[in-house]
Image (cartoon, grey):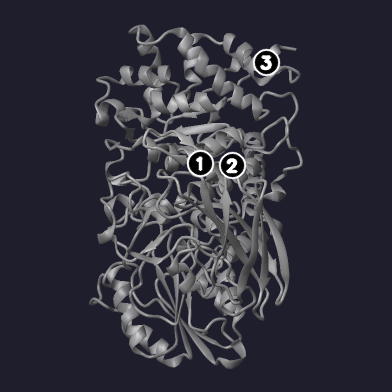
């Protein structure tokens, strides 16, 4: 048996043997995302580009989970682990089926370029809904769980996860190919790097993808500073450029003059794989003396090592139990429903929810997202075998009459080019007047907030210009409010919005996946208590935010913000009342008694925050632990939640992390310990002093 086919050897040994059997030309060809076959060695073609942000994406039918920001709102690492596992299982099944039919095209591989663990620092960023929110601790815990679920813990990876986009990247989209993100050592260490460190050191993530922009003058895909961080953390996977990012070196950033210089700079810096076409010029760079054959060999070993870790060169098929039957199976769709239910955040409720169907004759579902499949999807999504829109979920759950009206276009002033403006308001008002309750399904979709270059992004290359509803929807909501009918607002969006018009209840649904409509109905009619928490701060207005291009954390996120907060990070109501008492801390473990004092079963999220007296501490407080709990009415439990030692550390202006405080306050509650959170939620946090 050839050494590279011998499973008893390490992946590194096998990759070295296989690489050394290749010519330099063949080695260079394997550094492209669309690696060609090498028939003489039995190496099949392999396309590295596959997506799995919230289910297998862009590869046909797969289970469609809530968008990542919705998954983050669950505050449930165990659920994220399961979703990562399901995504990998379906990717395996789809890869096996495609390979059996000779299909090695894009989106058919086992290298999934997810999760996106960038910090959602500014609500205007269109791609923010791909992330796990604004907090580095929450992002790290959810990201680690997702990667571990996706990759598994066996000798062969179920699929290879990829942490992206390393590391200081969160808009603006319109200038991402030329932008230089200026970031201080403190913000880098305190906010932008922790999640990446956790995924590398704890989850052993197999891939890391660089970003388009520069970071303090260095292109992120060839940054000595960032590459040094990966080496410091012991990263031993593969590094891939964002797609066509290396081309930006000479075309946009001006750090190189030619395509060969760009290829050489990226390869020498540690970028093993090129998503794009710049590495097609690798041999020309070699001829020009810009690189050595050893540079190509080193990168080739790394990429082949990943393919070996995936079992792609083993003599027998791996994971034969992952047959085609697992794709979009009932069990996986049940998980998608559970995730959607746990993700939705009840922002306001004057008592109208849950609706009592026996007391209602009719409801009106009104709005451009009411019967929209696009509003369920988000971006980087697969194709579900069945979608349940908000309208369909309500129709299935409610025995009375359901009136429906689109109400308006998502953002244009008319739904038909031949019509006058405001062409759907009359129908909407008639439906509202005929109904006992109005359920307004408004918000955005991925055509309005998303990635620069995505088809349909209408404004600002996918970024949001402000935090308001589109004007067509603002006018609709004003008219519905003026009817005087009870008004429930359901917002499908991936980020902060301020509806401005008072409603009886407001429910943030995110982009909830294929089962979103059923999840919504289960919450509206009281089958399930809402339990999601905001993973981002909802601000009142964009005008009071720092400049979008300012990467400083000052007055950004709940740890630094001083004003302009509409709904705080960590906030979300339920249909019951959960209180925390008796908080203690000892030997790295917090213990707190949690009781459901209401009359409904509910899940809730107990959150721990720490406040430090160090001069280097964040101005407010930081999340340092959390746990999702399910409680029957009157039930009380004691939770034990581990607090990492890093929670007691602060970061100075030079980026040095250390324990510099002497007195700490630990808070526990179902929200933050700030006045607004406690006012909105009607609960208070319990606290205990800790001395280190």
Of residues 354 and 224, the one nearer the viewer is 224
Looking at the rendered structure, the number of numbered marks drawn on it comes to 3
Of residues 150 and 561, the one nearer the viewer is 561
Check disc 3 and report the residue beneath it: 4
Q: Are marks 2 and 1 in contact (CB under 8 Å)?
A: yes
Callout 3: SS = helix
Q: CA distance from mark 2 to mark 1?
A: 7 Å
Callout 1: SS = loop
Check disc 1 and report the residue beneath it: 649
Of residues 633 and 90, the one nearer the viewer is 633
Judge whether 26 appears above or below 273 on screen.
above
| Residue 285 on image: x %, y % | 36, 13
Judge whether 175 appears above or below 122 on screen.
above
Q: CA distance from mark 3 to mark 2?
A: 42 Å
Mark toward the start of the polypeptide (1 vs 3): 3
Callout 2: SS = helix
């Amino acid at each position: 048996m050839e050494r590279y086919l011998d499973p008893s050897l390490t992946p590194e040994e096998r990759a070295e043997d296989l690489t050394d059997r290749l010519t330099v030309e063949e080695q260079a060809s394997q550094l492209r995302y669309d690696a060609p076959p090498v028939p003489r060695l039995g190496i099949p073609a392999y396309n590295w580009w596959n997506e799995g942000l919230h289910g297998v994406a862009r590869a046909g039918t797969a289970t469609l989970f809530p968008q990542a920001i919705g998954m983050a709102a669950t505050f449930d690492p165990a659920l994220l682990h399961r979703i990562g596992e399901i995504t990998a299982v379906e990717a395996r099944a789809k890869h096996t089926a495609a390979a059996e039919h000779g299909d090695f095209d894009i989106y058919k591989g086992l290298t999934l370029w997810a999760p996106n663990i960038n910090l959602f620092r500014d609500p205007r960023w269109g791609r923010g809904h791909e992330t796990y929110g604004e907090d580095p601790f929450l992002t790290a815990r959810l990201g680690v769980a997702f990667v571990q679920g996706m990759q598994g813990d066996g000798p062969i990876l179920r699929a290879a996860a990829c942490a992206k986009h390393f590391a200081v990247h969160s808009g603006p989209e319109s200038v991402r190919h030329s932008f230089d993100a200026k970031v201080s050592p403190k913000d880098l260490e305190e906010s932008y790097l922790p999640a990446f460190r956790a995924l590398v050191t704890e989850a052993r993530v197999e891939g890391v993808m660089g970003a388009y922009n520069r970071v303090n003058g260095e292109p992120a895909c060839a940054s000595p500073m960032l590459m040094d961080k990966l080496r410091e953390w012991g990263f031993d996977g593969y590094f891939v450029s964002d797609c066509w990012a290396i081309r930006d070196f000479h075309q946009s950033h001006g750090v190189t003059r030619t395509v060969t210089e760009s290829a050489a700079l990226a390869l020498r810096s540690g970028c093993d794989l090129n998503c794009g076409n710049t590495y097609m010029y690798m041999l020309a760079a070699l001829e020009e003396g810009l690189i050595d054959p050893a540079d190509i060999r080193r990168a080739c070993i790394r990429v082949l090592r990943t393919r070996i870790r995936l079992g792609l060169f083993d003599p027998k098929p791996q994971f034969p139990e992952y047959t085609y039957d697992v794709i979009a199976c009932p069990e996986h769709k049940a998980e998608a429903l559970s995730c959607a239910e746990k993700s939705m955040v009840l922002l306001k409720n004057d008592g109208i929810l849950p609706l009592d169907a026996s007391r209602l004759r009719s409801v009106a579902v009104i709005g451009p997202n009411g019967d929209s499949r696009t509003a369920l999807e988000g971006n980087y999504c697969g194709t579900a075998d069945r979608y349940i829109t908000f309208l369909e979920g309500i129709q299935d759950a409610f025995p009375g009459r359901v009136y429906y009206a689109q109400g308006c276009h998502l953002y244009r002033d008319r739904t038909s080019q031949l019509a006058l403006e405001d062409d759907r308001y009359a129908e909407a008002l008639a439906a509202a007047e005929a109904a006992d309750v109005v359920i307004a399904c408004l918000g955005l979709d991925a055509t309005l907030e998303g990635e620069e270059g995505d088809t349909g992004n209408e404004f600002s290359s996918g970024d949001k210009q402000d935090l308001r509803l589109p004007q067509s929807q603002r006018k609709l909501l004003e008219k519905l409010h003026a009817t005087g009918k009870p008004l429930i607002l359901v917002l499908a969006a991936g980020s902060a919005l301020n509806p401005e018009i008072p409603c009886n209840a407001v429910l943030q649904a995110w982009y909830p996946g294929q089962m979103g409509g059923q999840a919504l109905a289960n919450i509206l009619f009281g089958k399930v208590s809402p339990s999601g928490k905001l993973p981002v701060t909802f601000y009142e207005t964009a005008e009071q935010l720092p400049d979008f291009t300012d990467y400083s954390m000052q007055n950004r996120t709940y740890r630094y913000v001083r004003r302009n907060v509409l709904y705080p990070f960590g906030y979300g109501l339920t249909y019951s009342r959960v209180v925390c008492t008796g908080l203690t801390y000892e030997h790295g473990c917090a213990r707190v008694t949690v009781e459901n004092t209401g009359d409904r079963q509910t899940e809730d999220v107990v959150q721990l925050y720490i406040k430090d007296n160090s001069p280097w501490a964040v101005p407010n407080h930081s999340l340092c632990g959390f746990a999702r709990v399910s409680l029957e009415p009157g039930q009380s439990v004691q939770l034990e939640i581990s607090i990492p030692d890093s929670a007691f550390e602060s970061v100075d202006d030079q980026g040095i992390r250390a324990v510099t405080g002497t007195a700490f306050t630990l808070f526990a509650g179902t929200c933050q310990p700030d006045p607004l959170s406690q006012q909105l939620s009607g609960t208070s946090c319990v606290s205990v002093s800790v001395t280190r």
